[in-house]
Image (cartoon, rainbow, N blue to C red):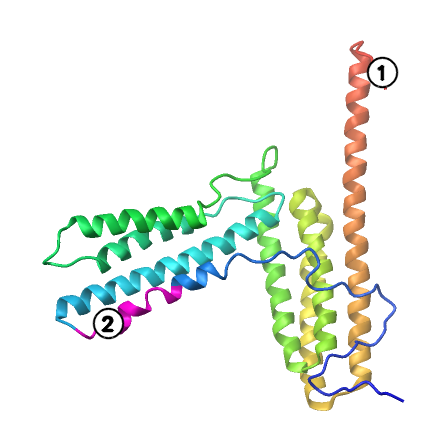
C-alpha cells in the first residue's frame, strides 16, 4: 500500500479540531505591485557604483551621490506602493501622510541629473535627464492617493482610535507569525495563517464602522494577547519535544478562538443592520407625520 511521505519540513495537516475549516491565508489576497518594476529601480543604479572608482574625484563624488539618491528614490517608491495597496484594500482609509511615490519621482529626476552632470558638458544635459527621469517615473508608478477615502460622516476621533487599536492588534498577529516559525511545522503555520485571516475580517468590519470598536476591544487586546503568548509557549515547547498532545491542544485553541472571532464579527454586522433598520423606521415615521407617503 502506498504511504504518504512525511518529515519535519514536509507539509502536513494540522489535527482536526472542533472549529471551522481552516481558510487559506491568501483568501482575498491580491498580487502585490511592490515588486517587478520596483526591483529594477534598485538594480538600475548599480553601474554608477561600479564605475565610480574609475576616474577623477569629481566622477567619484557625482556617481556615488547619484547612486545614493536613486536608491533612496527606489525605496520611497516601493514604500509608496505598499502604502497605496493598504489604502486600496480598505473601504475607509486616510491618504498616506507622506507622498512617497511623488518624492520618488522627484529624487529619480535629481539622481539622473547628478549622474549626467559633467564639468565639460552643457548644463542642459542634466536638466533633460531630470525632466525625463521624473516624468517617466511618474507615468510608470502614478501619484500617491491624495484624498481620504470613505471618511465622509465618520468621526475622525473614532477612526483614529480604531486605527490605533488595529495597529496594536496587527503587532500581536505579526508576533504570532514570527513565533510559530520556531515550531517548524508547516501544518500549524497554515492553521495560524487561517486564524489571522478571520481576525483581519474583524479588523475590516471595525474600520467600516468605528462604533463597533467598543464591542470588539477585548478581542483585539485581551484575546489576541493571549493567543500571542500561547503561540510563543507552544512553539518553544514543540520545537524541543515534538509533543503531539501539545500540538492538538494548541490547534484546538485556535479553532475555538477562530470560531469566537467569526461569531463576534457576524454579530457586529448584524448589529449594524439592526441600526440601519432603526434609522429607516425613524425616517419613515417622521415622513408619515409630515404627510409624506411612500408607495412601498
Magenta-colored stretch includes residue 207: no
Q: Earlier in the sequence, mark 2 or mark 1?
A: 2
Screen quadrant of the N terminus: bottom right
**Nearest the eye: 69 or 272:** 69
Q: Is residue 148 above or below residue 280?
A: below
- Which residues are the magenta region? 42-54
Residue farthest toward the left in the current orientation of the protein: 120
Residue 288 rendering spot, x and y as whole percentages: 82, 14
Q: Quadrant of residue 279?
A: top right
Q: Which residue is the extreme one toward the right?
A: 1
- Are the two marked residues, 2 and 1, in contact with CB atoms closer than 8 angstroms? no
User: In the image, is 78 to the left or to the right of 158?
Assistant: left
> Dot 2: within a 10 Å radius of its alpha carbon, few (fewer than 14), some, or many (20 or more) residues?
few
Q: Residue at x 68, y 82 (%)?
A: 183
Image vertical order of residue 101 relative to residue 153, above or below? below
Q: Secondary structure at mark 1?
A: loop
Q: For this view, does 60 lie left or right of residue 120?
A: right
**Pointer 2 residue:** 51
80 displayed left or right of 105: right
Q: Position of residue 238 (x, y in %)?
A: 72, 85
In the rendered view, does 7 fall on the left or right side of 30? right
Question: Measured along the vertical axis of the image, is residue 183 above or below residue 76?
Answer: below
Q: Quadrant where the C terminus lies?
A: top right
Name the residue rendered at 71%, 57% in the picture.
Answer: 218
Which element is circle 2 on?
A: helix
Q: Position of residue 271 (x, y in %)?
A: 79, 42
Q: Residue at x 81, y 77 (%)?
A: 249
Q: Is residue 53 magenta?
A: yes
Residue pointed to by mark 1: 295
Q: Locate residue 187: give its quadrant.
A: bottom right
Q: Main secondary structure of the magenta part?
A: helix
Viewer-nearest residue: 192 or 288: 192
Amino acid at each position: 500500500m502506498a504511504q504518504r511521505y512525511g518529515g519535519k519540513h514536509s507539509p502536513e495537516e494540522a489535527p482536526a479540531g472542533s472549529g471551522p475549516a481552516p481558510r487559506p491565508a491568501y483568501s482575498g489576497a491580491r498580487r502585490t505591485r511592490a515588486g517587478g518594476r520596483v526591483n529594477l529601480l534598485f538594480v538600475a543604479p548599480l553601474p554608477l557604483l561600479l564605475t565610480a572608482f574609475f576616474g577623477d574625484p569629481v566622477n567619484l563624488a557625482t556617481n556615488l551621490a547619484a547612486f545614493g539618491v536613486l536608491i533612496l528614490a527606489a525605496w520611497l517608491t516601493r514604500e509608496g506602493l505598499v502604502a497605496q495597496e493598504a489604502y486600496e484594500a480598505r473601504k475607509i482609509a486616510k491618504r498616506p501622510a507622506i507622498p512617497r511615490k511623488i518624492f520618488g519621482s522627484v529624487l529619480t529626476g535629481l539622481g539622473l541629473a547628478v549622474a549626467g552632470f559633467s564639468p565639460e558638458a552643457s548644463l542642459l544635459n542634466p536638466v533633460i535627464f531630470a525632466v525625463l527621469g521624473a516624468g517617466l517615473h511618474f507615468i510608470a508608478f502614478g501619484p500617491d492617493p491624495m484624498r481620504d477615502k470613505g471618511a465622509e460622516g465618520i468621526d475622525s476621533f473614532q477612526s483614529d482610535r480604531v486605527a490605533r487599536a488595529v495597529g496594536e492588534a496587527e503587532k500581536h498577529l505579526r508576533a504570532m507569525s514570527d513565533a510559530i516559525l520556531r515550531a517548524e511545522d508547516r501544518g500549524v503555520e497554515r492553521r495560524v495563517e487561517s486564524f489571522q485571516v478571520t481576525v483581519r475580517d474583524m479588523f475590516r468590519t471595525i474600520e467600516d464602522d468605528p462604533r463597533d470598536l467598543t464591542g470588539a476591544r477585548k478581542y483585539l487586546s485581551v484575546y489576541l494577547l493571549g493567543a500571542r503568548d500561547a503561540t510563543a509557549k507552544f512553539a518553544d515547547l514543540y520545537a524541543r519535544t515534538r509533543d503531539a498532545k501539545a500540538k492538538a491542544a494548541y490547534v484546538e485553541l485556535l479553532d475555538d478562538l477562530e470560531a469566537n472571532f467569526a461569531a463576534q464579527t457576524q454579530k457586529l454586522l448584524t448589529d449594524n443592520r439592526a441600526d440601519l433598520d432603526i434609522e429607516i423606521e425613524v425616517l419613515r415615521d417622521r415622513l408619515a407625520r409630515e404627510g409624506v407617503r411612500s408607495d412601498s
